[in-house]
Image: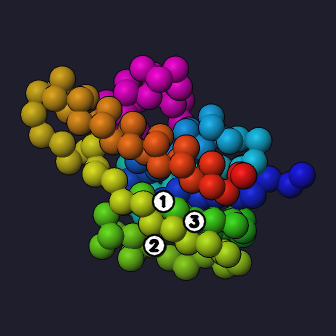
Amino acid sequence: MKKKKVLFVCIHNSARSQMAEAFLNQICGDEFETQSAGLEPGKLNPVVVEAMRETGIDISGNQTKSVMDIIKSGQLFSCVITVCDEASAERCPIFPGVTTRLHWGFPDPSSFQGTPAEKLAQTRTVRDTIKQTISAWCAEVCA
């Protein structure tokens, strides 16, 4: 069976899209070939790396990627999922051949304020919400 290609997109490809990519690979990687990219790629968020490590997933070696580079590569995706805020999602370019486009808005860990412990706690909440969303989606589309 050929895997369906899924692309997660957020602003910097430093947090939400990286977590979503990792969880989809973990939860139903036998069904999907997953990538992530950002509108303005930045640096991987170290708090996100730590939060993911707590779940047994190491994303520390991941690189951030540009949505435009993905488009230029000519890849076709069966699903593109934006995981940023609504206004940023509207900036996401149109992908050729895409059959499904979804928007799952999650708070941006790079915007969290407070002590390192408070930022980590807020990031854990986002991480767990992303994992729950992906688990529910997989249960629906992989059934």
Q: Earlier in the sequence, mark 1 or mark 2?
A: 1
What scheme was used to colour the molecule? rainbow
Is 41 left or right of 22, judged from the image as shown?
left
Q: Is residue 50 magenta?
A: yes
Measured from the top left, where is residue 57 in percent x and y?
A: 53, 26
Query: Residue 10: percent from the left, percent from the top?
Result: 42, 58
Look at the numbered discs 1 and 3 and tell me whether their residues touch, using CB distance below 8 Å.
yes
Q: Considering only vertical position in the picture, is 30 above or below 50?
A: below
Residue beneath the point at 45% across and 66% down = 103
Relative image position of residue 125 (x, y in whole percent): 30, 37
Residue at coordinates 53% horizontally, 56% vertically from top-left? 8
Distance CA(mark 1)–CA(mark 2): 8 Å
Residue under the image location 23 percent in, 29 percent down: 121
- Amino acid on which disc 3 is placed: Val
Q: For the residues marked 1 and 3, what is the alpha-carbon distance in whole angstroms?
A: 7 Å
Q: Tell me the tag on residue 9.
A: 1
Q: Could you tell me the amino acid type at mark 1?
A: Val
Determine which residue is flagged by label 3: 80
Viewer-proximal residue, 129 or 87? 129
Nearer the camera: disc 2 or disc 3: 3
Kindly indicate whether the residue at mark 3 contacts the one at mark 2 (C-beta within 8 angstroms).
yes
Compared with 88, 125 (above or below) is above
Q: The magenta stretch spans which residues?
A: 44-63
Along the line of sight, which residue is nearer the eye, 6 or 40? 6
Disc 3 on helix, strand or loop?
Answer: strand
> Considering depth in this image, is 53 or 129 the residue closer to the camera?
129
Q: Earlier in the sequence, mark 2 or mark 3?
A: 3
The answer to whether the residue labelled 1 contacts the one labelled 2, judged by CB atoms less than 8 Å apart, is yes
Disc assigned to residue 139: none
Task: Indicate the position of residue 102 as horizontal and vertical percent values.
Answer: 51, 68
Q: Which mark is residue 92?
A: 2
